Amino acid sequence: MNDFLSKFLLLLTGFVFTTIAGGILTYYFQKRSWTRQAYLDLYKKKYNDGTVFLDELSELIGKRLFFLQRFAWSISDNDKERMDRLEKEYYEIVKIWNVNYYRNRNKIRLLVNETTADMFLDYLDDTRGNNPNSLHYKFVITHRIVMASKLDISKLQAALKVVDMLNYSCSHFLEKLTSEFTLRAERMQLLELKELKDNFSKQAK
């Protein structure tokens, strides 16, 4: 009887420890699974937020270029009413641009890096006169040249060439920005999410 009781207690003890160990392991793996899923969800959200921003910025750049180009073309039409209307429409886009260019620069810096942010807006361009490096200041210079051609139509052809050069600068910037964003996303470093992943991993241990 004592032998039977000993075996029963041993079996019961083993069952209890197995149940407890199983519960601990289940909790551990569930927590690790949750941690991984939480990290992936955060990464996906940041990536999606980034792609939405790129779409919005691309649209804004395209609009400012198109409205500026359309206004420049209207200067040679000898139709003051149309020119004034297109100029007004262009300035509406300029207002949106000017309200958001600091915000857009900061987002580029966070999403990609400082170098690419400088390609969009480089504060040192204030000292470079008519030879800026950043897209924002290239718009500023082109804007001034086009407006000068409105007062002196003999300058229009030169202004249209500058607008064409700006078109190339816009394309180059957007290609560079998209490539850098995609590369950083592939390395899973978007918005320093690697640090978040490490923090989650520590909590799971």
Image (cartoon, rainbow, N blue to C red):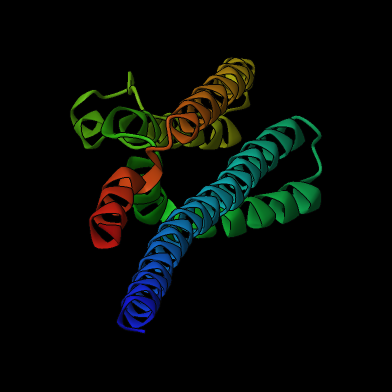
Counting from the top left corner in percent of width and height, residue 119 is at 37, 28
Q: Residue at x 48, y 57 (%)?
A: 33
User: Image check: 190 left or right of 67?
Assistant: left
Counting from the top left corner in percent of width and height, residue 104 is at 42, 50
- Please tell me whether residue 42 is drawn above or below residue 15 in the rendered image: above
Q: Residue at x 40, y 34 (%)?
A: 120
User: Image check: 53 left or right of 128?
Assistant: right
Q: Quadrant of residue 73?
A: top right
Q: How many marks?
A: 0
Q: Residue at x 23, y 55 (%)?
A: 202
The quarter in which the N terminus is drawn is bottom left
Between 27 and 171, the one nearer to me in the picture: 27
Residue furthest front as drawn: 1
Between 187 and 76, the one nearer to me in the picture: 187
Counting from the top left corner in percent of width and height, residue 138 is at 43, 29
Q: Is residue 105 visible?
A: no
